[in-house]
Amino acid sequence: MIFRFVLFLFSYGICVISVSNLLLFLNYRTLGYSWRAVIFYILGTPELYLMICSLAVLFILIFDLFPSRFPFS
């Protein structure tokens, strides 16, 4: 139970940090870069993949796709 809670907090923190970094990358638009260049830059950053992985872990933890204990133990 405590492992799932700690994993939730860790995934949530990673998700918040990566989403805030991705939003900061949109400031390149104000420097004169095109939307296409900004989107391709965001697609190549590790923050996007960290966000996707942390959202997947959060989805698994919230919707209880893995039981916290086995039924016959």
Image (spheres, grey):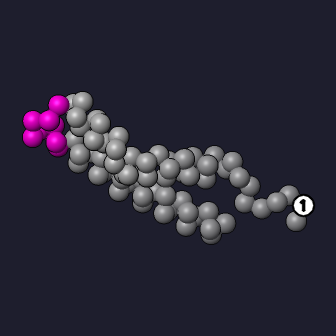
Q: Is residue 35 above or below residue 7?
A: above
Depth check: give the residue in front, 22 or 49. Answer: 49
Depth check: give the residue in front, 37 or 63. Answer: 37
Name the residue at 35% across, 40% down. Answer: 43
**Residue 56 vs residue 14: left or right?**
right
Q: Is residue 72 above or below residue 28?
A: below
The single residue placed furthest to the right in the displayed view is 72
Q: Is residue 46 above or below residue 42?
A: below
| Range of residues picked out in magenta | 27-34
The question of residue 67 being in magenta is answered with no
Indicate the secondary structure of the residue bearing disc 1: loop
The single residue placed furthest to the bottom in the displayed view is 2
Does residue 50 appear anywhere in the picture?
Answer: yes
**Residue 28 vs residue 72: left or right?**
left
The question of residue 29 being in magenta is answered with yes
Residue annotated with mark 1: 72
Depth check: give the residue in front, 1 or 43. Answer: 43
Name the residue at 61% across, 49% down. Answer: 60
Name the residue at 22% across, 34% down. Answer: 37
